[in-house]
Image: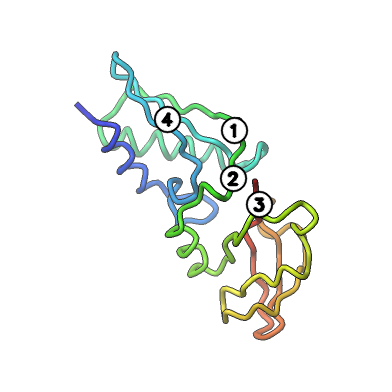
Amino acid sequence: MVTEKEIWQWLEEVPDPEIPVISVLDLGVVRKVEITKDGKVNVTITPTYSGCPAMSAISISIRLKLIEKGLKNINVINQLSPSWTTDWMTEEGKQKMKAYGIAPPTKNPSSDELFSDEQNIECPQCGSHDTRLISQFGSTACKAMYQCNSCHEPFDYFKCHH
């Protein structure tokens, strides 16, 4: 008989489709794992934002991982409330993201500060805080595009959500 703890461990192996160096657990989108009395496995996930196109890929990847581990009766539930927040990300995931070249969220700014050039987001390439906002949207809608004024490299910043 499989345990919830084992399922959580297996989900650590499921990469985020947009940032493959972090798992769906690092990202904080997996909210709950439940095994019902009849052996059905329910995995509840919350999207980083309501229109996130990666959620169907995440759902499929979760199903495939659990099937690979021998489970058959799997239900992946999309839950919009409470809304996902960057507070749910693991610190390890944020460090993996930075090493991959994406500036991780650093704090939960107010909406007035969200896209301020004064945020001085740390460049994941050289570590400089002398950076500037290029675009409110980067390679995906959950990221903003910044450029470092020191090394001149552009980089994605994973936006804070709260």
Q: Amino acid at mark 3?
A: Cys
Q: Which is more N-terminal, label 3 or label 4? A: 4
In the foreground, 67 or 144: 144
User: Which numbered disc covers residue 85?
Assistant: 2
Q: Quadrant of the N terminus?
A: top left
Q: Are marks 1 and 4 in contact (CB under 8 Å)?
A: no
Q: Is residue 66 left or right of residue 103?
A: left
Q: Which is more N-terminal, label 2 or label 4? A: 4
Q: Amino acid at mark 2?
A: Thr
Q: Which residue appears farthest toward the top when viewing the image?
A: 38
Label 4's element? strand
* Label 2 crowd (10 A; few <14 / some 14-19 / many >=20): some
Residue at 66% of width from left, 70% of height from top?
Answer: 121
* Label 1 crowd (10 A; few <14 / some 14-19 / many >=20): few
| Residue picked out by circle 1 | 82
- Classify 19 as above or below 50: below
Which callout, 4 or 2, points to the residue nearer the camera? Answer: 2
Distance from the alpha carbon under mark 1 to that under mark 3: 18 Å
In the foreground, 33 or 69: 33
Label 3's element? loop
User: Which numbered disc covers residue 43?
Assistant: 4
> Where does residue 63 sit, x and y in percent of width and height?
40, 33
| Residue picked out by circle 3 | 142
Q: Which is more N-terminal, label 3 or label 1? A: 1
Which callout, 1 or 4, points to the residue nearer the camera? Answer: 1
